[in-house]
Amino acid sequence: MSTVLDISNKNVPGSDLPAKPEESVQYVNELTTLNLGPTHPATHGIFQNILQMDGEKIVSGEQTIGYIHRAFEKIAERRPFYQITTLTDRMNYCSSPINNFGWHMTVEKLLGVTVPKRAEYIRVIMMELARIADHLICNGILGVDTGAFTGFLYLFEERENIYEIYEEVCGARLTTNMGRIGGMERDLSAEAIRKIRAFIKRFPPIMREFEKLFNRNRIFMDRIVNVGGISAERALNYGFTGPNLRAAGVDYDVRVMNPYSSYQDFEFDIPVGQSGDTYDRFMVRNEEIWQSLRIIEQALENLPEGPYFADAPEYYLPPKKEVYRNMEALIYHFKIVMGEIDAPVGEVYHAVEGGNGELGFYLISDGGRAPYRLHFRRPSFIYYQAYPEMCVGTTLSDAIVIMSSLNVIAGELDA
Amino acid sequence: MTNEEVAKDLIRQFGEDVYDFDDPHGMLTLSTTREQIIPMLQYLKNHTIYQISFLTTLCGIHYPDDPNPEREFCVVYQLHSLVNNFRIRIKVFLSEADLHIPTATTVYMSANWMERETYDFFGIIFDGHPKLIRILNMEDMDYFPMRKQYPLEDPTREDKIDALFGR
């Protein structure tokens, strides 16, 4: 199964990397208030930070969020289950398929639907592609924020290829609305498989080149080693999950601890860091990209034959051909589209490993067509709280790098 | 470490103050009083075997149709023991007349924004919270939008009657 892999190695012979910031910084001068955001280009989203600066050093920070709050939890209380998928798209829009499938799996858990293996494997492939796309953006932009644009452009070409695979699988690129409750809306086409195979062949050399450019780059390391570190204990107390928590040295991964969608079938490592600093976060994400590739290869290799959707006529739209010829199929089609189907009463929490960590769905159904209450556990909303603490004592340029490496996605933050 | 074991231990520890045990989809669910919630979080966190020391979510629920006015609002804490891979859900019911509950920020730093969000959506007041102001909505909003009495769509519109759409 899965093993833990320590990727943290900062010992470069002959280098004198910056020391950790001292425990208490002495401030003597008058403080300056600096308004970082809400539309600062380096914040990659709309959020404001009011920083108190003593010269170059940050003394304290305060975040204001909610600029793109769209009340998803309220909207969800009026929508039938299948219509909520499009809301989840817009949370972490860098890895929409993970959100889509996470929601579908939550509903399937409530309904007690078992999804066939083939659908689960297709989901795994798409989720891992989404994870790669998510991490590519985060690490690429971290390069941009430290002044290296090249890596970002290299990686974005590959992200484009991932989006083309999405397009082949579901027809959309960014807000994917991929899959259906009960499985996938269509089987993996030969063209999709060809594209995935082409991707896993073409991508590794580019990723290696990217790593060669950054991983041991002296300038890059000087900028990010020991910047924005957080201890494992603090990270857990702040509710960190995902790559940011693993960078602090805790090997918590939902895919391993509570396997869903057949993740127990695959062999992969959990990369962990040591000091939870920006460099560790960067390295953990890089390594996770490799592990995701491993999972995709295994899933493609062992892709089972069989149906790609479950027998859940009340939730899974019947094939269009059937709708025209078969009375029952027409009735179900109408009932699903109009949201006439009442869900069973129940209360369920389901978590998936999103691009940023544990993405949870807490669904309470009172037996109506829409959820009675739906709460999203959005990882970035929870760990972004720690941002001021991580910034104190660093400079403004470090604060930008820390935010970038935390991968705070505005859509997920504000829901 | 099973649901039953933890439930029995909590009954031993908190007696009458834990009730409504259930395990929907395998997750131990129970209710407690607002006086006991913080001691219970502390107890679970500091327990040498359980080590339930990760706050996964904290959110509110509104039940305006509950016949018992003491159960109109609910605050749900979902906790996780990363060591034992054990999840537990603790609920605290509140009445609209007295929407106060002690803050969990003394136990978990992560509760800070989750409590602010719950306040923002439902108006539940977390006593002792370091900065209990709205977080996602604007400061001058004068209602709590996730309460059930606020409809999502404009109720004056006649072309969107719920009856027509089965809502």
Image (cartoon, coloured by chain):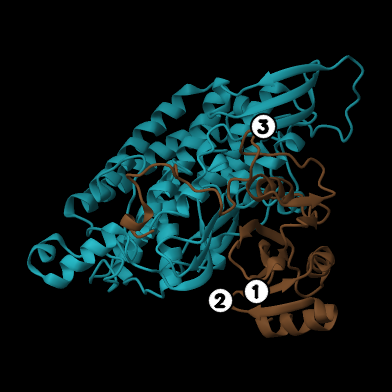
Chain colours: A cyan, B brown
Q: Is B23 rendered above or below residue A314?
A: below
**A243 sits to left or right of A92:** right
Q: Residue B29 carries which label?
A: 1
N-terminal of the pair, mark 1 or mark 3, is: 1
N-terminal of the pair, mark 1 or mark 2, is: 2
Q: Quadrant of residue A19?
A: top right
Q: Is A300 rendered above or below residue A24?
A: below
**B127 sits to left or right of B65:** right
Q: Alpha-carbon distance for marks 1 and 3? A: 36 Å
The chain under label 1 reads B
Q: Mark 3 points at which residue?
A: B140
In the rendered structure, are the residues bearing label 1 and label 3 in contact, judged by CB atoms less than 8 Å apart?
A: no
Q: Mark 2 points at which residue?
A: B24
Q: In which quarter of the image is residue A101?
A: bottom left
SS class, disc 3? loop
Q: Specify the amino acid type for callout 3.
A: Asp
Q: Are marks 1 and 3 on the same chain?
A: yes
Residue A232 spot, x, y in % from top left: 73, 52
